[in-house]
Structure formats: structure tokens, C-alpha cells
Amino acid sequence: MTDAAGSRRAPDAVLGRERRLIRSALFREAYDQGRRQFGRCMVLWLRSGEGAALRLGVVTGRKVGGAVQRNRARRRLREAFRRNRHRFAGTWDVVLVARRAALDASWDDLSAELLSLARKAGLMGSEDV
């Protein structure tokens, strides 16, 4: 990707409000559709339907830990998705449910698991498969 001056820049990796799932009804739709992949650090759910466009929602339950640990797990999963979003293709919304292991996993393991689950779910672009 190049800008107006012709220099190379990173793919658009901003995860702004329009790229996030916020309404609980959309999370419920993802769960009801039942498309999921299980990993050690996270569970990846897919939602198809109106407005689906690689938006992200992250969920942590109390089993993950206290508020500080839950927020840390959410931040780590959001960042892993944000850094790899350019590799994903399709018209799906993604819900990531953090597991306790997401807190202790190395960054490389967390990213590798996200990519592995995305590949199994059919989210990877053709050049990344």
C-alpha cells in the first residue's frame, strides 16, 4: 500500500467503532448460528447476516479472572485481531471469547492460534491459506 508521496505504509489496521460489534443482539446471533472453532486461548464464533463485514466483538467471562485480567485478555485478543485483520476475507463478523490461557500465552502463540482458528473457519484470504 502506498500513500500520496509514494512511500510504503502498513495496511489499514485501525479497529475503530465501525469495525467492532457492540450490540448484544449481534453477539446472540453469532452464538445462535453455531459456527465456532475452539482453541486453547480462545473460542472463535462467526456471524453472517446483515451488516457483517469482519467486525470484531470480544467477550470474557468471570472464569478468566478479575476485572483487570478480563480487560487484559480482551486487549490482547483485540490487538491480535487488529494486527491480522488484513489477512482475513469474507463477510463475517467475528466474536472471540477469551479463555484463561489467553493471559499466560506468549504473543506468538496467541497470534498463531487466532490464525489457525481463522483458517479452520474459512476466514483466511486465498493468498494466506
Image: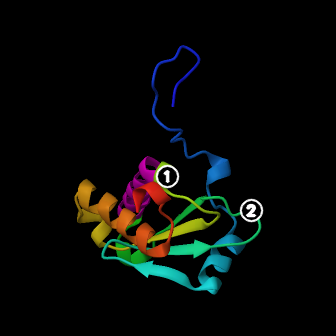
Q: Residue under circle 2?
A: 51
- Tell me: residue 126, above or below residue 62: above
Residue furthest front as drawn: 127
Identity, as a three-letter code, of the amino acid under mark 2:
Gly
Residue 9 in picture, x, y percent from top left = 46, 28
Query: What number is the disc on residue 76?
Result: none
Image location of residue 39, percent across then percent down = 35, 76
The stretch drawn in magenta includes residue 66: no
| 108 with respect to 87 (left or right) | left
For label 1, the SS is: helix
The range drawn in magenta is: 68-85
Disc 2 element = loop
Residue 16 in the image: state x and y as whole percent: 60, 45
Give the quadrant of residue 35: bottom right
Image quadrant where one finds the C terminus:
bottom left
Q: Which residue occupies the foreground of this view, 103 or 110?
A: 110
Find disc 1 in the rendering and name its residue: 85
Q: Position of residue 81 (x, y in %)?
A: 45, 55
Question: Which SS type dominates the magenta stretch?
Answer: helix
Pick the residue in front: 123 or 78.
Answer: 123
